[in-house]
Amino acid sequence: MTQAYAAFNPTEPLGPYQYKTRTTGPKDIRLEILYCGICHSDLHSARNEWGGAHYPLVPGHEIVGRVTEVGSEVTSFKVGELAGIGCMVDSCGACENCDAHEEQFCLNGFTGTYNGVDKKSGGYTLGGYAQHIVVDEHFALHIPDNLPLEAVAPLLCAGITTYSPLRHAKVGKGHRVGVVGLGGLGHMAVKFAAAFGAEITMLSTSKSKEEDARRLGAHHFALTTDPETNSKLQGHFDFIIDTVSAPHDHTSLIGMLRTNGTLIIVGAPPEPMQIPGFALLMGRKHLMGSLIGGIRETQEMLDFCAEHNITSDVEVIPVDQINEAYERMLKGDVRYRFVIDNSTFQNA
Ligand code: NAP
Ligand code: ZN
């Protein structure tokens, strides 16, 4: 049996749960999970804030583990090797977006690592707050062996979610970039934008994070709660990447863009955004969304991180502190990603 932590309904804390994983199919690998990051999407899902939650729901899509079994047709992993799993475990493999290595936009819908309809075993997929997981090798990533594994796990979601749009927008030298929200995604956005050579301003509600923002690579820091920030930064940025998990004012962010500037939305609060058309018309402003990244780009991101020594700043916790971590994450008290040490299931 696999020990796990699950949400059983939207309102109560997560608790222990156990199940049998599917048997390892010909194209599958089985992992013993070593570490799993805690993403704010886990909390949105566990509490059914986006709708469509199926309980018991085992969250977790920032998974690093060791391969303990490989199917007869597996070619890219061997027993004993490290492997990573992000937000997807399946897609149709036949549509134009899958062909273009953008499985996250599979026209037939990708299968999420948790709470997804499991085409292989029926039921719903169960994620990384667990001891084991079985996955098709196509959706497993090769993990660099020169980086600390607990700090690599968050790259599988927070990393690729910020790397992909910054790359797509060709962010680099000469660009002024604003990063909104210094949490799991935000701190990776700062690190990548810095590695790409941009001039970065951290836009935060937490004065206490200023020193960290600069240490992570931001050149400037502005408090979004300070009324002067808005006027001081009018027309300033080429790009703003917005990682905020709760309702907030997007119109003032658009005002901080230069002509032709782009507001990149990666944060996913359940409430709809409210933006007057005029905010975009004046200055031909662009609004762009982005969802994680394809498997090939995720591998590219991991290889980039290995080369440039980029990892997440993490606070490692035992499994029985997941609920406390959720409460702290809700208060913005996260520096800058909680990561579960999955070996602690043995004592849980
Ligand atoms: P997180 O670690 O909780 O960070 C969110 C940060 O947003 C907080 O640390 C805080 O930063 C800021 N914030 C929180 N509430 C705020 C409010 N009411 N007003 C203004 N700022 C606020 O969350 P995360 O794991 O980075 O995830 C962020 C969002 O991205 C979530 O909605 C998540 O579901 C979504 N997400 C999207 C994708 C995708 O593919 N697009 C992938 C993963 C996650 P400060 O203290 O600096 O203000
Ligand atoms: Zn995530």
Image (spheres, rainbow, N blue to C red):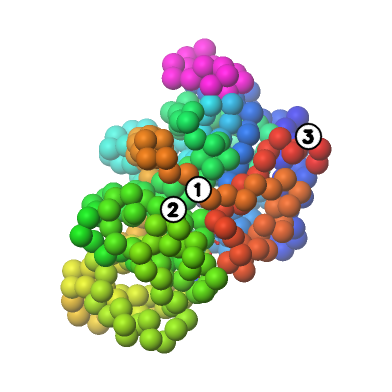
Distance between the alpha carbons at the discs numbered 3 and 1? 25 Å
Asked whether residue 91 is drawn in magenta, I would say no
Q: Residue at (27%, 53%) from the top-left corner?
A: 197
Residue at the top extreme, as displayed = 72
x then y, percent, for residue 251? 35, 79
Q: Is residue 288 above or below residue 314?
A: below
Asked whether residue 68 is drawn in magenta, I would say yes
Magenta segment? 67-81
Q: Residue at (75%, 60%) from the top-left corner?
A: 12
Mark 2 lies on residue:
188
Q: Is residue 119 above or below residue 244?
A: above
Pointers 1 and 2 in contact (C-beta within 8 Å): yes
Amino acid type shown at disc 2: Met
Which image quadrant for residue 228? bottom left
Q: In terms of sequence position, does the residue under pointer 1 or pointer 2 come before the other?
A: 2
Foreground disc of the pair 2, 3 = 2
x then y, percent, for residue 31? 60, 27
Residue at the right extreme, as displayed = 347
Mark 3 lies on residue:
346
